[in-house]
Image: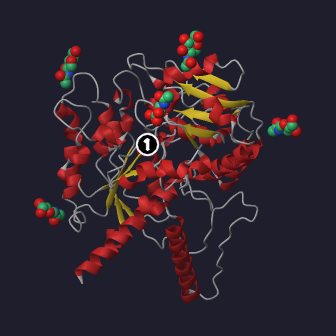
Amino acid sequence: MDFKNNLNAYSPKFFFTRYYYPSYWILILTLIFLQIYLIFNTTSPSAPLSLAAASDGRQSSITVARDPCNSGRVFVYDLPPFFNKDLLQNCESLDPWTSRCDDVSNGGFGRQATELNGVVPDGLTPAWFWSEQYMLEPIMHNRILNYKCRTLDPESATAFYIPFYAGLSIGRYLWLNYTTSDRDRDSEKLIEWVQNEPYWNRSNGGDHFITLGRLTWDFKRWGNNQWGSSFAFMLGMKNVARLVVEREPSDPLDIGVPFPTGFHPRSDADVLNWQSFVRERNRTNLFCFAGGTRHEIENDFRAFLLSYCANDSGGSCRAVECNGNRCASGDSVVMETFLDSDFCLQPKGDSYSRKSVFDCMLAGSIPVIFWERTAYGQYEWFLPGEPGSYSVFIDNKEVRNGSASIKGVLEKFSGERVKMMREKVIETIPKIVYASALEGLESIEDAFDIAIHGIFERFNRRHNSASKNGS
Ligand SMILES: *[C@@H]1O[C@H](CO)[C@@H](O)[C@H](O)[C@H]1NC(C)=O
Ligand SMILES: *[C@@H]1O[C@H](CO)[C@@H](O)[C@H](O)[C@H]1NC(C)=O
Ligand SMILES: *[C@@H]1O[C@H](CO)[C@@H](O)[C@H](O)[C@H]1NC(C)=O
Ligand SMILES: *[C@@H]1O[C@H](CO)[C@@H](O)[C@H](O)[C@H]1NC(C)=O
Ligand SMILES: *[C@@H]1O[C@H](CO)[C@@H](O)[C@H](O)[C@H]1NC(C)=O
């Protein structure tokens, strides 16, 4: 399978295309190291400089001692509770059909996953929760309030965070007979509030960012009586960066961040323990699929995969049919299935992206992608740049018309190759989890750290080019 070609097939459209080129990265990394070296050598000649990449190649995170806030500080707006805390308080009404009180508990991590006792290593159970896929907003907010590079002085801020729980808010109005003005009301209030803040006008929100715990489509209503709110299209939002669990590839303000998974490590040790657990796991199935079907969708690919798996008499495939809430909460079967499989099938769900991609990788299983937008071009700050290094791409159309056999493709990978890909997946694990340590992990960067550093870098770049143009 030629992944270069797959990449070329979709990358030209993308804002981030040039970042894929290795030479670009080598140049950037060299510059960063040079800069770090200069900073440490000029400001404190005796300071220990530790650029320690672990020599066994298993953990490639780089630890830099000293001022962790070189790249910036964030100011967090203290919004009226109407925009965030009240939503958590009124968890009974976040969803028209069911209470979300379990989901918003423990700072958005959800209920403790005691059912995973015996499935995950002893001692790690307290780091596992039943985290709901759309809980990014409270999770990020809690972390950022305790973040070491948070500043209370807006004058010294590189970035301004608006902790409006836009996804929780809109989740109440997406269905039933609510009108488009019901769906836009809170967003309009938010914009009115933030525009009256003195630091908004410096760049009309250009150094501001927000998290959107639901898909970008939920905030981009195209016409009257269509789906979603029009938050992302509102004039006041036209410069504000969005950390969002599914981005629109052509929208540079959308920055894809991982869906929250259930693992929220308390320490570096939790991450390392988990990594060695999934590395040493004996996997009995070649591939697996966990998903539900949508009977109202004609030719639903998920139904096709369930049937494909059921027909596989050789026992290479293990399927979990997710009806009702089965796969979302309280049942360890999905985690066990991923832990027991080399590959996991990840078709598009109701949207292109899937929380399941992250659950699968977390278990050290290699994702099989059928639509490029499910993973590639979505989470550039978090997933490896080369799709073929950690995933397999099989075009859904080729599966449909019989020109590609899923089992045939997967069987062709040698044991050695599978091991290499799995190692890449395992190396990625810290980048796709949200730590429960409120001040972050000791030296490992999690998804939160990466997201905030990315924001700082982007705003610094923007600021530098603006001041160049100005002088
Ligand atoms: C929606 O319909 C229900 C009755 O089915 C009614 O009680 C409610 O007020 C309506 N809501 C709106 C926003 O019109
Ligand atoms: C920011 O600019 C807007 C539009 O020019 C203005 O209405 C508002 O009063 C300004 N806010 C502050 C705090 O200066
Ligand atoms: C995996 O299988 C090998 C060989 O059968 C065995 O030596 C090893 O202990 C097993 N590892 C685990 C974690 O069960
Ligand atoms: C599985 O087998 C059934 C019965 O033979 C067949 O109708 C169906 O098309 C098969 N499914 C797939 C995905 O091949
Ligand atoms: C199957 O679909 C692929 C992708 O659309 C196409 O390139 C190929 O020619 C098709 N093959 C058959 C046998 O229809």
Q: Residue at x 57, y 27 (%)?
A: 290
Q: Quadrant of the C terminus?
A: bottom left
Q: Quadrant of residue 60?
A: bottom right
| 342, above or below 314, in the image | below
Q: Is residue 71 left or right of residue 464?
A: right
Q: How is the image coloured?
A: secondary structure
Residue behind mark 1: 373
Residue nearer the viewer, 177 or 98: 177
Q: Residue at x 70, y 52 (%)?
A: 272
* Quadrant of the displayed image that contains ligand 4: top right
Residue 403 x/y as whole percent: 54, 30
Q: Is residue 471 left or right of residue 73?
A: left
Amino acid type, callout 1: Arg
Q: How many marks?
A: 1
Residue 387 x/y as whole percent: 55, 49
Q: Residue at x 51, y 40 (%)?
A: 109
* Label 1 packing within 10 angstroms: few (<14), some (14-19), many (20+): some
Residue nearer the viewer, 426 or 199: 426
Q: Quadrant of residue 386?
A: bottom right
Residue 141, visible in the rendered structure? no
SS of the residue under disc 1: helix
Residue nearer the viewer, 65 or 292: 292
Residue 207 x/y as whole percent: 31, 64
